[in-house]
Structure formats: structure tokens, C-alpha cells
Amino acid sequence: MATTHALGFPRIGARRELKRALDTYWRGEIDQDTLLRTGRDLRSRHWALQAEAGLDLVPVGDFSFYDHVLDTSVLLGVIPERFGRKIGEDNVDLDRYFRMARGRAPRGEDVTACEMTKWFDTNYHYIVPELAHDQRFTLHAHTFEAQLDEARAERRRSKPVLLGPLTYLWLGKPRGAAFDKLELLERLLPIYAELLQRLAVRGIEWVQIDEPILVCDLDAAWQAAFKAAYQQLAAQQSPKLLLTTYFGGLGDNLEWALQLPVGGVHVDLARAPEQLSEILSRLPDNKVLSAGVVDGRNIWRTDLEAWLEPLERVHDQLGDRLWLAPSCSLLHVPVDLTGETRLDDELRNWLAFGVQKLEEVALLGRALREGRASLAHALTANRAALAARRDSSRIHNAAVQQRLHAVTPAMSRRASAYSQRAPLQRARLNLPLLPTTTIGSFPQTQSIRAARRDYRAGRLDRGTYEERMRAEIKHTIKAQEALGLDMLVHGEPERNDMVEYFGELLEGFASTQQGWVQSFGSRCVKPPIIYGDVRRAGPMTVEWIRYAQSLTERPVKGMLTGPVTILQWSFVRDDQPRADTCQQIALALRDEVGDLEAAGIRAIQVDEPALREGLPLRGSERAAYLGWAVRAFRLATAGVQDETQTHSHMCYSEFNDIIRAIAELDADVITIEASRSDMELLAVFAEFDYPNEIGPGVYDIHSPRVPSVAEIAQQLENAAEVITQQRLWINPDCGLKTRAWEESKPALANMIAAAHKLRARIGG
Ligand code: GLN
Ligand code: ZN
């Protein structure tokens, strides 16, 4: 009997119940008990969904009020001193937990939040553990055990989920002077051992222990640490461990990882199916293999019969030692397709969201147990859906294919080098030295959101809606003029989200109504679905930008989302290489760039905040990715005249390791996040002479705090030390859409005052 299970389920709820509860709790509108009850209800419902789908084990501990890495920090007592020393009897109190995540909670004083960064190559963000060189660990398992009690009360067969000790350390950041994080392992392991022992006493049979770093490049020290750590855990009283990997193949870690003294291994066969045969030949014959065959990162129906072929053979070989699961936690897909009443039937039939993926796993399990004949009906339906998708006329567009074949390398190169373009642009734009600008969006006020809601619900007609948006644009342009910014933006009021907006306008894309995926905390995004060849039906942004430019003499930037970011933040078709889909998007954007230029727009920004996030986890795959990603950006932007200035913007990540690829984008200007890391970024410019113009963000827009002139001036001085004055721009870190006008105006005024100070000093 093949055991079936899921590694984790989305926490947010099919109707974003958790998001709503969190937001209202943080605003002080509901009490903690109400929030806790929402959490309990969601857990209970999600376990029920998994059991009803027919899965044998349910994960416990995958739920989180904010982030599972932060939960692990609390579980292990890793709480930085600024959040208070004393840890409660059994548990850290929930408000302190929220202060660690976001600096603020209904009770207690504001404090600097912990850093947040991307979870492997996903758009989910985790809270980075802060590790001191003398870090102590203490077990605080109250919350975890309470959830096990809940599951037991509901008679679920529980499989607790833990983030493994090595991955936990890997994700952490040393606080203060650098040290080798592996030195902490010796102190960390007894805590894991204590917890496992407690779970054994409870009668738990299996524990899922997540070690996704096993799909990353691990040096000898980490490999040795893995072996030592799991040896030590195996020597204790413990449930059986399911060593769980995802987001790629085990690669060169395969051989030794399979030998670790654990009960079984979960592998991601959706991402790395090629590893199956080697795993089978090397799997010790006392170990379980959990096959992650249903893609937990994408929303396409699984080809069940294509999987049954190899799985039946594996089942013959392994018998009960074969388990089945989605490839990774379902955290990365929306909850339930049945919420999508507006998707057309044809497209819907191609998709599987979280609940449907549970059903797919269960079906595969039944097929192995009872034989294919017992579910002939379901298999036929699956086959028909896949065939319908493959043959659909909506997927292939001959014109797009032709255009793709006609792309030449020259199309990805500007006509002249930056050194020739720059003087032409300078003459045309007539900007002062150290020009000031912003990243694109201005505050998305209540009234903007209300107008969009009303328009979508049909309560506002199109004319009135557009009128309101024009009023917002006008207000934003006038505000920027009054502040004295040099290069303006229209403010993006008409965009709900920088990817969803374009997804709704491009052909080959579909939007969902409830396809929410957690990005961080209570923030969710609704990634569009790219199902077919991508084409631009017509201009997408030109009228808004043309209008904005008509209101002012100063240059207004055209504002687009780049091909890599649109790809990265969508669910991408799996029937052709991602690089090809990216190129199609690039061609569509190239047309938009051309139309903006033809409309007299002198500067065009193409944002690529997700460029870094798409970087493969394995070093050996990075050059290829950066190659096609950079080409796509250039294909989108390089068609313009020398006089037209291209901009790009990036945020959310570390750039130091990809700075050369960023330079190869050959954008005339790039604005980049820097202030949150105290301009750590600037270190790279001391060694690498960035060839074009660059604006390292001088203040953090993620915080409501208004930075002083002196503070910003200091940041500017730091930047001016490593970046040539002629190439330095002055701007915030990112778009202002999450801020209020009351914060943005004084902050920008201070930024501009600091710019004037520096200009005066250097005689500009
Ligand atoms: N132009 C976008 C904005 O200002 C960029 C957002 C981003 O970098 N994530 O909102
Ligand atoms: Zn940004």
C-alpha cells in the first residue's frame, strides 16, 4: 500500500480568511482569541480536506500565523534580545512573534523587525533567523504540541513537519562579526533530539524533516555536518524521519544523502524526474521513498498515466516503501479551483490547484493499490483534459511563433554604446547633475482602491473610472513638480499589481478570481496563468503615460514590468522552455516600448525586481539562466533610439553576485534597492566599475519612518564615493504604493534637499 501524504497546505484559506484575521488583529479590531480561533478553524478544515481527498497522513506544523521559519526560530528559542529576553513558560507570546516579523503588534513597543528574504527560488518570503556566535537554543514546543493535540482530537493520522537543523542554520544570518554557522550545530542538535523524543513518547510514527538545501551546492563542511547531525539524531529515541527535499534534484548530494540514517527520503520528481532511476539503484532497502510527482509549484493538471508507467515499476520494486506526495508544500499554489467561477470551462479543465492536487495524489495511490481499472473513469477524464490542452487552438499562435523565429541577435543590442547614447540623452532630457526621481508607484489610496473595486463590480462605468485615474495622475504629477523632482512618473494608480495588470491585458494569459498565493505574512498575490503564446492585443500603457506627459514639461518615465518578472511572478506553461515564454513576453513588451517612444516619451523604465529570484539554486545552471534572462530584457528594451533613455529597477535581493549580469542589461539607468542593507551594496562598486548610470535607493520605503535630510545626505555621500557623479541618480528604494502621502511627501522633500546639498558641495 503506497502511503499518500502532502508536505504542507496553504495556510491563507480559500477566501484569504487568515489574511483578513491578521489584518484586523493588527489594526486592533479583533482580539487574540478570535485570531487564534481562525487559525484553529483553518487547520481543522485543511486536515479535513486532505483526509477527504483520501490521503493517509496529514502534516501538522505546516500552518503558520506568519512564516514557518519564524515559527522554527520561536520553537528553538532564537529570539534576538531587542524583542525582550524572557521567554514565557511554554511559548513566546504572539505579539512578540509579530514584532519579530513586522516590527509592530497591537501590544508592545515598535522595534526593528527581523530581515525578510526569499525562500529559495520562490516568491514566498521568510523571516531570517538572527544567530549570535554564542547563540543558545531552548525548546518551546507548546504551540507545536497544541496543534498535535488538535489533530489527535480530530482523529487524524499526524505527521509533524519540522524544518531540519541544517537548513535552519543555512537560512540564518550571523549577527555581529561573521562566524561559521556550523559551529552552532552542536548546541542546536540536543534541542531537536529533545523534541523528537517528545514526539516519540506521543506515539508519533513519522516526522517530516525538511532539508531543502540538499538540492543546493553543499561544500565538504556542510556535507560532513549533515552526516554527523543525522547520526546523532539517529542515536536518540525518535520517530522515523522522512528527510524531505524539494525545489530540485539531489544531484551530487544524492549518493551520501540516501545513506543518511533516516527512515525515508522525499524527493522532488516534478522538478527533477531524471533522478528517479539513480535513486532507485542506490536507495538502501530499509528506506521509504516518497515520490513528489504532483507539481507543488505550478497549477497544471498532472499527467497521471505518464506517471503511473514508472510508478508501477517502482511499486513492484519497493512495495509499501513507496510513498506518494506533491513535490513540495502546496503553499505555492492557490487553494481550490472550484472558487474560479469565471474561468472558462476549457481552461479550467487544464488546471489543478491545492485541493485538486491532493486528489491527484490520492488517485495515483489508488491506482497502485487497486489497479488502474478501478479508476478507469478518472484516468480517462485526465487523459482527455491533457489531450484537449495539447491540441487547443488557444495555445499556439502561428504569428507569434514566426516572429520568435525571426528574432536576430541585433534586436537585443542598442544601436550605439552607452558612451555615445549618454550625451544625446543628456542634451534631450536637460537634467541637472544628480537627477532625482522615484521608482514608479505613488500611494495607492483608499479612494483609488475603492474606484477599482467599484469599476470591477460594475458599479462604476469605464468613463468615470478612467476620469478618476486621470485625476490621480494629475495630482501625482503636480505633487512631484511641487516637490521639485527632476524625472517624473505617472504613479501607477491604474495598476492593482505590477504583473497582474499586464497579465490582464496580454493574450495567452488568464487571471483568476481567488488564486491567491501567500507572498509574506498576510500579503498575497494572484499570479496570472500563462497558458498560450503571448501576444500584445494593443497598447497597454500608452494613453496613461501620454496623458501624464501632457501635464508637465519635465520628462515622465514610461513604466513597464519586465519580461523576466512577468514570467517569474506568473504560473508558466510547462509545455515549452521558460526561456521561450520569456522571449514571447519580451517581444510583446518591445512593441509597447516602441509605442511609448513614438508617443514622445523620452525615458522608459522596465522593472525587473524578480531577476535575482529566478537565479537557479545550483551554480552550474546560473550562467544559462542569466544568459536568456538578460537577452529577454534587452530584446524588450533595445529597439529604441539612442536619445531614448531606458531605465530598470530591481529590489528585494542581493545583487552583488549578479552585478555583471545587471550591467549587461545595458539599461541607461538602473535604480536598485540598497538602503535596507546600509548600502552594503555599494561595496561592489568599489571593485566593479558599473558602466552606466545608477541610483542606489537612499531610503527604505518599507518603513513608515521619514528619514532626515542628514541621514539621506550621508547615504548620498557614501554612494558618491564609489559611483562617478555623472552617473549617480537619487531615488528611494522602491515604489511608494504601500506608503501614505503624509509619509511620502516629507520623505521625498528631504531626499531632494539632500540632493541639493550634495550638488552645492560638488559645484553642480
Ligand atoms: N514600478 C514599480 C513600483 O514603483 C516597481 C515595484 C517593485 O519594484 N516591486 O511600484
Ligand atoms: Zn522595488
Image: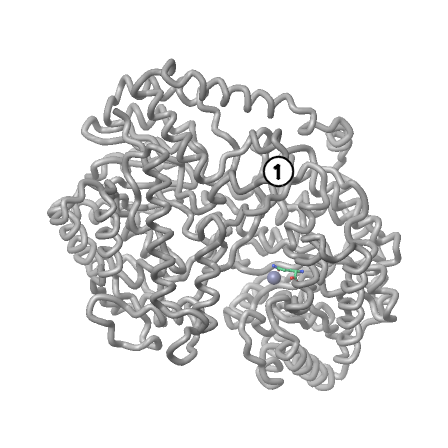
Q: At which x and y percent is residue 342?
A: 62, 40
The secondary structure type at the circle numbered 1 is loop
Q: Which residue is pictured at 57% across the width and 82% down the height?
A: 711
- In the rendered view, does 507 fall on the left or right side of 680? right
From where the camera sits, is residue 735 visible? yes
From the image, tell me which residue sits under label 1: 343
Q: Residue at x 51, y 59 (%)?
A: 523
**In the rendered image, which quarter is residue 707 located in?**
bottom right
In which quarter of the view is residue 180 placed?
A: bottom left
Q: How many numbered discs sit on the rendered protein?
A: 1
Q: Position of residue 34 (x, y in %)?
A: 37, 64
Quadrant housing the N terminus: top left
Which residue lies at the image location 24% right of the left edge and 31% below the top edge? Answer: 288
Ligand 1 falls in which quarter?
Answer: bottom right
Classed neighbour count for the residue bearing mark 1: other residues with Cα under 10 Å, few (<14), some (14–19), many (≥20):
some
The residue lying toward the viewer, choosing from 503 and 603, is 503
Picture coordinates of residue 227, whole percent (x, y): 23, 44
